[in-house]
Image: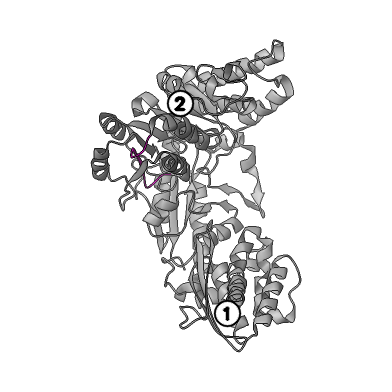
């Protein structure tokens, strides 16, 4: 392990027990736990300087505004933005992607235009584009996923012949763990005249995400997966691109002047931030970013990589267990989805819960990907900087217990069950 | 929360050895049911004669609770009148809401442990809702 277990002391929630057993939290791909520093920042905001931003003359409002904008600067630096105004605060990745579809999309996508996505996208990077396509008469196409869980890059090359307006892809799959070659894809997409939107919800929590190095045009992220609070995240886009886009929600804060018939809008990012923003959570996300940088992003990446490699190795010891996605930790993040022969993923998660182990079961908001692999659902363990090899060992022990409990189910009818019983 | 309350012997047995599994032909009712969030899918087949459940079977896939519940349900309603089958649906739903199961429930009482696990209740009720909808559709057709 790269990081010591001392780091766990920063996460108050992790010290609890479940039915007398230590909590083993392996669902950070759904949401990460929060360090004390983030919790304190939230509490301090509401206790000491809660005020509405961008309009108060008084000291409290000045302080709240300064801290809110300071958080924007931290996020801009975190993703390598050219200037802070390239960061739009949103509720999270989902809202950021919807914002792009509803503003840039409506202004730039017309009948017959193609939007190219991939089969491994989270629903949040599919549904907004389906809604846009239905409204504008555009066409959705998907880059297939190989049996190994990587994007079929030859097929991608061929699909570019349709000259899509937009290529949308995840930096890291929330199911397969696959880290996609975003730069390679972005360069080809740009040559074909497309813009590139990157879903960084799963990558930003564990690795350096540099928008220039990735070649992204839009990048979306969620604070709650990167040690920050729920309800805050962001969209990065080049300033000129944001400037050319129509606004998203209408309301206060996003206007320069309002008449009865029409209004004029502020410059980015404010024209995309109508209404009172989520000041407390934005500030706390800034603190989460400080925390990650203090620990060291490279160290976090290596730590999660080490746990992933160890988990892939140990899970293979379990008879009847199938891992989806790359079988080694190369270009792979810390989400490991699997199925166990003749045991439904919900039963796997239920028995593990009895051991204090929290894993997710279902389709993880990636139904098309599960259909691609011919399974209705999977179980998923995912890691962050506070997890340990001992917790991977606990997972393996727990899975042996699942097998023993369902051993009697050995002759369960397999028909129509995709092997999951 | 004791896991033994959920995974009772009789439940694991029905999961391992489902009764009345497969397609029933000919049938009077073929009712599909699904829990989209879990990916559980089920088709319930009924053959009805003289106001009784003369034949019943199911196919599909899902977790141990939904599969065992379906298997036990088919055993429980075979030979019952349609009114008796409906009464059993009501009793089962009542049990899931916390009512004590009566004698008519038999082995089905083993499923009462599910109610301690709220997210799994919809797994147990899936086949029963399909049965109710199937009977409703059948009545409406006649």
- Chain at tag 1: B
Figure coloring? one colour
Horizontal side of A148 relative to A27 (left or right) equals: left
Q: Please rate how many residues cluster around mark 1, counting C-alpha atoms within 10 Å: few if below 14, some from 14 to 19, many from 20.
A: many
- Say if the magenta span includes residue A183: no
- Say if the magenta span includes residue A115: yes
Horizontal side of A249 relative to A161 (left or right) equals: right
Relative to A395, is A40 above or below? above
Q: Going by the picture, which residue comes out furthest to the bottom?
A: B50
Q: Residue A223 appears in which quarter of the rendering? A: top right
Residue occupied by mark 2: A236
- Locate residue B108, reporting x and y percent: 65, 76
Residue B74: mark in rendering = 1
Q: Residue A306 appears in which quarter of the rendering? A: top left
To the question of a shared chain for discs 2 and 1, the answer is no
Helix, strand or loop at mark 1: helix
């Amino acid at each position: 392990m790269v990081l010591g277990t001392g780091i766990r002391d920063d996460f108050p929630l992790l010290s609890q027990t479940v039915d007398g057993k230590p909590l083993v939290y392996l669902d950070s791909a759904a949401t990460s736990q929060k360090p004390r520093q983030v919790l304190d920042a939230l509490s301090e905001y509401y206790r000491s300087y809660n005020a509405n931003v961008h309009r108060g003359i008084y000291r409290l409002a000045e302080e709240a505004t300064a801290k809110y904008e300071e958080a924007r600067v931290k996020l801009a630096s975190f993703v390598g933005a050219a200037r802070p105004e390239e960061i739009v605060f949103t509720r999270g990745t989902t809202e950021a992607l919807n914002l792009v579809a509803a503003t840039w999309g409506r202004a730039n996508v017309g009948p017959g235009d193609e939007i190219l996505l991939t089969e491994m996208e989270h629903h949040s990077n599919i549904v907004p584009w389906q809604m846009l396509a239905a409204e504008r008469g555009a066409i959705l196409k998907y880059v297939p996923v190989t049996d190994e869980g990587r994007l079929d890059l030859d097929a991608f090359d061929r699909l570019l012949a349709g000259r899509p307006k937009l290529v949308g892809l995840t930096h890291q799959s929330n199911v397969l763990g696959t880290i996609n070659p975003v730069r390679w894809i972005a360069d080809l997409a740009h040559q074909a005249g497309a813009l590139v939107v990157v879903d960084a919800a799963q990558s930003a929590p564990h690795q350096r995400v540099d928008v220039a190095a990735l070649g992204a045009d839009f990048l979306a992220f969620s604070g709650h997966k990167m040690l920050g609070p729920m309800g805050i995240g962001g969209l990065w886009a080049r300033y000129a691109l944001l400037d050319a886009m129509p606004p998203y929600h209408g309301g206060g804060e996003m206007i320069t002047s309002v008449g009865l018939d029409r209004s004029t809008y502020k410059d980015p990012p404010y024209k995309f931030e109508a209404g009172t923003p989520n000041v407390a959570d934005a500030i706390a996300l800034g603190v989460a970013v400080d925390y990650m940088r203090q620990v060291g992003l490279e160290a976090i990446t290596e730590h999660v990589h080490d746990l992933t490699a160890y988990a892939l190795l140990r899970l293979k010891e379990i008879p009847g267990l199938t891992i989806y996605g790359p079988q080694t930790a190369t270009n792979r993040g810390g989400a490991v989805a699997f199925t166990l022969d003749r045991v439904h993923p919900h039963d796997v998660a239920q028995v593990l819960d009895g051991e204090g182990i929290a894993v997710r079961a279902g389709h993880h908001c990636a139904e098309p990907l599960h259909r691609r692999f011919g399974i209705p659902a999977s179980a998923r363990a995912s890691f962050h900087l506070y997890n340990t090899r001992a917790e991977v060992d606990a997972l393996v022990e727990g899975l042996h217990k699942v097998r023993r409990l369902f051993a009697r189910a050995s002759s369960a009818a397999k028909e129509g069950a995709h092997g999951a019983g | 929360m004791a896991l033994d309350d959920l995974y009772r012997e009789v439940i694991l047995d029905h999961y391992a050895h489902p009764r009345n599994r497969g397609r029933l032909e000919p049938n009077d009712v073929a009712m599909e049911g699904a829990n989209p969030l879990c990916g559980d899918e089920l088709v319930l087949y009924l053959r009805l004669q003289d106001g009784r459940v003369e034949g019943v079977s199911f196919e599909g896939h899902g977790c141990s609770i939904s599969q065992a519940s379906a298997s036990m349900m088919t055993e429980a309603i075979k030979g019952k009148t349609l009114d008796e089958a409906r009464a059993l649906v009501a009793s089962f739903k009542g049990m899931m809401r916390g009512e004590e199961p009566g004698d008519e429930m038999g082995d089905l009482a083993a499923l009462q442990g599910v109610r301690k696990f709220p997210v799994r209740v919809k797994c147990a009720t899936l086949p029963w809702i399909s049965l109710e909808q199937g009977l409703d559709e059948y009545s409406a057709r006649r």
